[in-house]
Amino acid sequence: MDPLKQKFQEKAQALAIEMKAFRKEHANVKVDEVTLGQVFGGMRGVKSMIWETSQLDPIEGIRFRGYSIPELKKILPKAPNGKEPLPEGLFWLMLVGEIPTEEEVKWLSDQWKRRSAVPEHTFKVLDSLPITTHPMTQFISAITSLQTESVFARRYAEGLNKSEYWDATYEDAMNLIASLPRIAAYIYRRTYHNGDHIQPDISLDWAANFAHMLGVKKPDFKSLMRLYLTIHADHEGGNASAHTTHLIGSTLSDAYHSFAGAMGALAGPLHGLANQEVIKWVFNMLDVLGTRQPTKEQIAEFVNNTLAAGKVIPGYGHAVLRQPDPRFTAQKNFAQDYIQNSDIVEVVWKTFEVVPPILQSLGKVKNPWPNVDAHSGALLVHYGVTEYSYYTVMFGVSRALGVLAALCWSRALGFPLERPKSVTFDWVKNNVGAEAKA
Ligand code: CMX
């Protein structure tokens, strides 16, 4: 058994025993009360899922296994002479709860290289799609086509013992993560660079190889990809892409189906697609204003016009966060460290000063601050990746790390089929209304 799998098995067995006993003892203890506002309001804040890999605090933001992004930037292993954490290290941390050594991260990098072969039929599926197909649709199609490789599906069909679900899920998670950069880069090159594909460079780490296959030559772009693929990886379990993975996985659908579904959720403009919407909105603003260097007053007018047209300001607001997103701050710090004189970065920073007071003045927006998507596009545009319809695919490559690590845990801990209760409005009127009158 490989060393990561071995470590995971030890941790998972111990936690499964502890959790089972705890559940038995406390099964009837109330965790929370659910209001009608939450039932109608997208279940905000309802505590209803166990998710081990990360936890989100409304003020402090995300912590991966207890570590904040600034802490991870310091302690996760880095590439030689690099300043940004390697996503391999974050995956290791999320999966087994320990900061890996340099050697462990190197081992994981090598594993993902070995597992990264993409079957020919996946490229054929991609090539069969019209070139105008949205990159997220291409990504989802490619992931679905890869399901032919599922170890879980094959072993389940052969009669897999439930005590081994986690083992087959681990194999699928590792293989799927390993193949994503190649698939994602293939989509980029076929869609925007006439199918002029770039072969993988096996001397590079997972994120740097992705940067290489995209065809962006500037060395700092590799650093950006390491940071980008680390900070987008996980945001606890309730966000739409994570929850979708969890829900689909709970039917014992394999990692490929679960992750393809998650990418459908990520492709919505209120979730991951917001990263393309931000830059589309910024480009549109610059076009309308006829300048690359708008004043704050001009930006404010454009923001007000967007709101008056019944649209949201993309990249702002969050269902949980109530402060600027530390993932936004991490990207702002990256820009400050690596980038001088970028008009597009300046526009994003000025927008950050303009938007929050306007959203606050509406009196209904619970979080007027920027989220992760407000900054990512400006960095990509700076390095020449201007095709914003592609951005959510990059988010998706990263999101695989968190949701697939969590899927391994779900199978190891034996979590059941997810099946909450729905009610009709008549039921609400007869029950909740009656209770209020009484
Ligand atoms: N611009 C304008 N209005 C906004 C807003 C924004 N950025 N954020 C929230 N609002 C509005 C909501 O649309 C809602 O209006 P109605 O009552 O008229 O329907 C009201 O303020 C209250 O919403 P909320 O409770 O503050 O926010 P929600 O938890 O319902 O929604 C989110 C959260 C992210 C969907 C919302 O803030 C939004 O639409 N933001 C813009 C899209 C975006 O950036 N999404 C990316 C989120 C991060 C990610 O998942 O990647």
Image (spheres, rainbow, N blue to C red):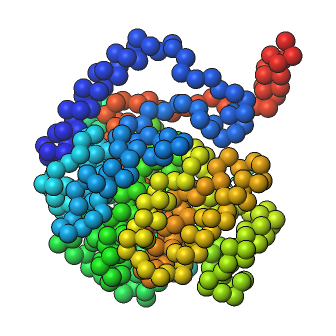
Q: Is residue 244 above or below residue 114?
A: above
- The residue at 43%/71% (across/down) is 335
- The residue at 80%/16% (across/down) is 435
Q: Using residue 421 as the reference point, say whether residue 381 is left or right of it.
A: left
The x and y percentages for residue 166 are: 29, 38
Depth check, front residue: 344 or 154 = 344
Q: Is residue 35 above or below residue 166?
A: above
The x and y percentages for residue 384 are: 44, 83
Quarter of image, res 299: bottom right
Depth check, front residue: 251 or 364 = 364
The x and y percentages for residue 264 are: 54, 57
Q: Is residue 219 above or below residue 401?
A: below
Depth check, front residue: 60 or 269 = 60
Q: Is residue 285 above or below residue 311?
A: below
Q: Using residue 148 as the reference point, say whether residue 246 is left or right of it.
A: right
Quarter of image, res 233: bottom left
Task: For residue 315, say whether it is visible.
Answer: yes
- The residue at 61%/85% (across/down) is 292
Depth check, front residue: 77 or 229 = 77
Q: Using residue 284 as the reference point, say whether residue 106 is left or right of it.
A: left
Task: For residue 261, say whether it is visible.
Answer: no
The x and y percentages for residue 410 are: 38, 36
Quarter the C terminus occupies: top right
- The residue at 21%/35% (across/down) is 9
Q: How many marks?
A: 0
Quarter the N terminus occupies: top left
Which residue lies most toward the right here?
437
